[in-house]
Each structure stands twice: as C-alpha cells, then as structure tokens.
Image: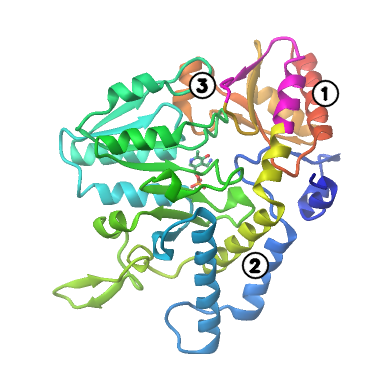
Amino acid sequence: MLDIQKIRADFPILSQKVNGKPLVYFDNGATSQKPQVVIDADAKYYQEINANIHRGVHTLSQLATDAYEISRGKVQEHINAKFAHEVLFTSGTTHGINLVTNGFASILKPGDEVIVSSLEHHSNIVPWQMLCEKTGATLKVIPMNEEGELIMEAYDALLSEKTKVVTVNHISNALGIINPIKYMIDKAHAVGAAVLIDGAQAVPHLKPDVQALDCDFYAFSGHKMCGPTGTGILYGKEEWLNKLPPYQGGGEMIKEVTFEKTTYADLPHKFEAGTPNIAGGIVLGTAIDYLNEIGFDNIQKQEEELLAHATKRLLEIEGLKIYGTGKNKASVVSFNIDGIHPYDIGSIIDKLGIAVRTGHHCAQPIMNFFCIPGTIRASFSFYNTKEEINLMVEAVKTAKTMLS
Ligand code: PMP
C-alpha cells in the first residue's frame, strides 16, 4: 500500500492554495507535477557540474557527460532497449515523432500508405500528413467505436503490402483508452510495415518494454512522468536509426566536415545535433528513479482505484456523460454535462481550486466523432486521492447548478 500523504509531501506544489482553495491537480495528462528530488537534481546540476558535454577534456565537462550518459543508460534499462544508442534524447514526444517523419521522407514513395488511428493527438497526425504531402504517400485512418476503442477488424482490413508505417498511441490522451498495441505491432510487421508508438500518455502509468513490444519506434515526453519540460526520448531500433537520415545538421552529429562532404557520427549522436538540454536529460533519469522507487505496480493499483471512484461518483450527476467507456483504460475521465459547455464548467471549478483540462485536448478528430466541441478531462496521478475526487464532484455539481 502506498502512503499517499507521504508521497504528496514529495511534491511541494501540491500543498499550495489556488484561488484561496487547496489545489486539486487533475491535469496530469497535460503535465505531471515534480517531486523535490527532481527539483533538487536540476539545481545540483547547475550548482556543481554545469559544462558542455561530449567536448571538453576538462573535469566538469567529463562529469556532465558522464551524468548525461548514465541517464541515457537509465532510460535504456527502464524501457528495456537492447542498446543505449537506441535511446535518443529529444525535447519531447513531438520532436521524436517529427524526427521519424522527417527520416521517412526519403523512404516513402507515391502509392505507399501510412496508417494512423482516429485516437491520435495532433502531434501524431500532423507530422504524418506533412510527410504524405511531401512524398505522395496516402494517409489511412483506423476508425473507432462509440466506446472510444479502435476497431481492429477495420485495422486488419487497412493493412496491405502498401502499408509502410503504422502509428498509434499507447494510451489516448483525450479518452484514456489503452490501445492493443502488441496486436497492432505484430499485424503491421506481418505486412512489412514499421511501427511508431506514441507513448506520451503511457509512461506516467506503466513501464514499456520495447523489446517485448517489438515496436520500431517509441516516443515519449519527460514532463508527463515527473521529469522536466523540454525533455523526451525517442527509442528507435538500431537498424531503423541507421537507415534514417539525420534530422538536424550541426555540431556533435558529425564524424568529419569538409565543404565537399560531411560524414555523420555514429548513433545516438547522429540524431543529437547541437547542445542538448543537458540538465533536463540528467534530471529525467532522476524522475525515472523516483517513479521506480514508488513502483509501477503500486502506481497502477492506486490509479485504478482513483479511476473507479471517479467514474462511479461522476456518474451520480444527472446529465453527465463519460466519453471513452472502453474496458482498457488509464486513469483519465473525459466527460460533459448535457447542455453545458465544458469550458464553463472548467472555469467555475478552477475558482474552487480544481485544475482540469477543457477543450479538444489536441485531438479534434475525436471531438468531431462525438459531435462535441470538447470535454472536461480529469487525469489522475498516483499522488491524487479519493478525497480530491470528492471535492471535484462537489465542484462540478456546484457549477452545474450555477449554469443550469
Ligand atoms: N501525444 C500524446 C498522446 C500526448 O498526450 C501529447 C501531449 N499532450 C503529445 C503527444 C505531445 O507531447 P509533447 O507536447 O510533450 O511533445
């Protein structure tokens, strides 16, 4: 059993008052809060070892380089990548996806097909659209059902020898639905397609095993898993990362430069041009250590309880509808109240100290599917409590009364 009060004490922001009320932070899907060890690790880097990496012979540069590479190793172990050089530091999921789509621009041909799902965040739609525009490839979309689940029969029917890439999120940010990615990866591989998994919403809740999944790419952001903003990881299988051209040119990504020809550095440096977010990369390792100390089994148990409690309590409110009612769900509840705009509810409950997300959650096609402008999304973390959910339910009831 987790001692939630002890865990909450690790997060200084959680004891704050907002609008004169104790903060109830349910916008974890947008970004998670940071524990003191993460905040301290950031300061410690700048206080003690700040220097540029991979270049200096001097001691600080060596210390910073070692810390950065140790962090890469932590990520490798965390996601069970075969090699550390398959782990690329990025600025976030968006950066990782664009790195891959940029690479595929030199691989795809007119007539090739890219399959995305109807549950994607815009950052896993738009880069693929841009890629298709550039290459003449065609974008195909896996449909969803009323429960917010992808329709696997339709996915199977879309796959063919024309399919070159399949991309899908592990967990939907707007609905919390967990997608059957292992099945989807195996099916895509059977037709010779590469698979990118957008793991942005999965990594706060689970430990992905990229070798067991056998995905070709797995992208995620550090800031959603207790790490700093502007950090992220793109895992890529060695053979794919060797095949793809570099994303950006610059320092650090070269072997040799002349005006006639430049040769590129080995992995992972080929994809890490310029001075990276050194502190961020190191501190992401601290965040991963912190999560592993709490333990993902414990995290999941706590979050399952929160999801069940929130679902039950919210459904007591007349006229409230939850979107994403599929069986396999992470701790996210997306809902609306009949005849009331989600933004109005969100604004009123903010005044009562409750932070939720309202709007389309960068997933407009999902909102279009349900014919709604947006939803109110409460996304829970292991540091949230049932008491906080009760406060949200009361606040939503108050808002409903005011707006009806
Ligand atoms: N994909 C999903 C499923 C997300 O939830 C998000 C963040 N909301 C992203 C991609 C983009 O992540 P970032 O903004 O950190 O690049």
Which region shows up in magenta? 305-327
Q: What whole-number distance in Å separates the C-alpha atoms at marks 3 and 1?
A: 27 Å
| Residue where numbered disc 3 is placed | 148
Residues 137 and 216: in front is: 216
| Amino acid type shown at disc 3 | Gly
On whether residue 307 falls in the magenta region, the answer is yes
Q: Earlier in the sequence, mark 3 or mark 1?
A: 3
Residues 105 and 344: in front is: 105
Q: Quarter-wise, where is residue 345 in the image?
A: top right
Do the numbered discs 2 and 1 sit on residues whose CB atoms are within 8 Å? no
Image: 334 above or below 233: above
Residues 338 and 379: in front is: 379
| Residue where numbered disc 2 is placed | 42
Q: What whole-number distance in Å separates the C-alpha atoms at marks 3 and 2?
A: 39 Å
Q: Earlier in the sequence, mark 3 or mark 2?
A: 2
Q: Nearer the viewer, mark 3 or mark 1?
A: 3
Q: Earlier in the sequence, mark 2 or mark 1?
A: 2
Q: How is the image coloured?
A: rainbow
